[in-house]
Image: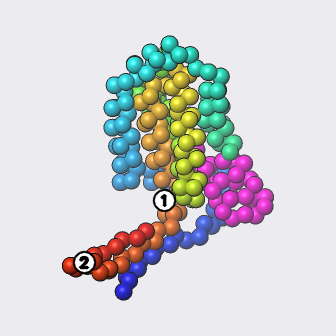
Amino acid sequence: MQAALHTQPDPPSLEPNPFTHLFQNLGRDLKDFPSLRTVTILGIGGSAAIVTSRDDDQVDDWTIDHPAASWTKIGKVGGDGWTQGGIAIGTWAVGTLIDHRLTAHVGSDLIRVQALTGVTTWVLKLSVNRTRPSGGDHAFPSGHTSATFATAGVLHRHFGWKAGVPAYAAAGFVGLTRVRDRSHWVSDTVFGAAMGLAAAWTVTRGHDAQSWSITPVATPGGGALVLRW
């Protein structure tokens, strides 16, 4: 005998034009940003940033002794907000042109998450105004890292781990290049990742399908309940 409970989200719908509704979407996402899930994500990210900050100086000393190679420029360009925004706009435009509902919806979410991430990251940057290893301002958190983890989070929420794993790997690479370039401390990138993930969760809340079941099974000497999801 099996008792199964399934909850499926509504199929992704064609949302209003993400440009004409940019501020409406941003206002709604900023309102929804504080939640138990985002507080948990940011709490874990903040704790990890505190732990890694103990090694910030040591890692920076190593980067000084080992100058970054030319490949770090890939992360500088790939993680730039304009690049991530371009990817988002391009995805939405393609989905709209070919009338592919899911692609347009993902593109719309990517536009929304980049707007939300940009605002929340820069509010924190201006508030903290931490000095970069190279001497510049506004180090904390890393905007390149938050932008790429936001994109990765949206892809993960829509398509699962098959898309999430390579997307997170690419985002991690961007964070690494920012440290190697001495543009950020390690702790900047750690919390930047958390910021991006929190924004992705906010924008895609309710998008992922959840299906789980409870199955009674016989075991030697008794029984057990097996939870599947």
Estimate the x, y position of residue 171 in percent, counting from the top left. 55, 40
The quadrant the C terminus occupies is bottom left
Residue 146 versus residue 62 in the image, above or below:
below
- Residue type, numbered disc 1: Arg
Q: Residue at x 53, y 16 (%)?
A: 66
Q: How is the image coloured?
A: rainbow
Q: How many marks?
A: 2
Q: Nearer the viewer, residue 109 or 57?
A: 57
Estimate the x, y position of residue 95 in percent, counting from the top left. 73, 58
The extreme top residue here reads: 65
Where residue 16 sits, quadrant-wise, is: bottom right
Estimate the x, y position of residue 155 in percent, counting from the top left. 58, 53
The quadrant the N terminus occupies is bottom left
Single out the mark in the foreground, 1 or 2.
Answer: 2
Q: Residue at x 46, y 71 (%)?
A: 211
How far apart in space, not on screen, are marks 1 and 2 (Cα)? 42 Å
Of mark 1 and mark 2, the one earlier in the sequence is: 1
Q: Which residue is mark 1?
A: 205
Q: Residue at x 48, y 20 (%)?
A: 132
Q: Is residue 123 visible?
A: no
Q: Circle 1 sits in a helix, a strand or a loop, which is it?
A: loop
Mark 1 Cα within 10 Å, few/some/many (few <14, many 20+)?
some
Specify start and end residues of the magenta stretch as a single range: 88-116
Q: Nearer the viewer, residue 80 or 4?
A: 4
* Main SS category, magenta section: helix
Q: Is residue 201 left or right of residue 70?
A: left
Find out whether residue 97 is within the magenta segment: yes
The extreme right residue here reads: 97
Q: Which residue is mark 2?
A: 220
Residue 167 versus residue 55 in the image, above or below:
below
Q: Circle 2 sits in a helix, a strand or a loop, which is it?
A: loop
Q: Residue at x 72, y 63 (%)?
A: 100
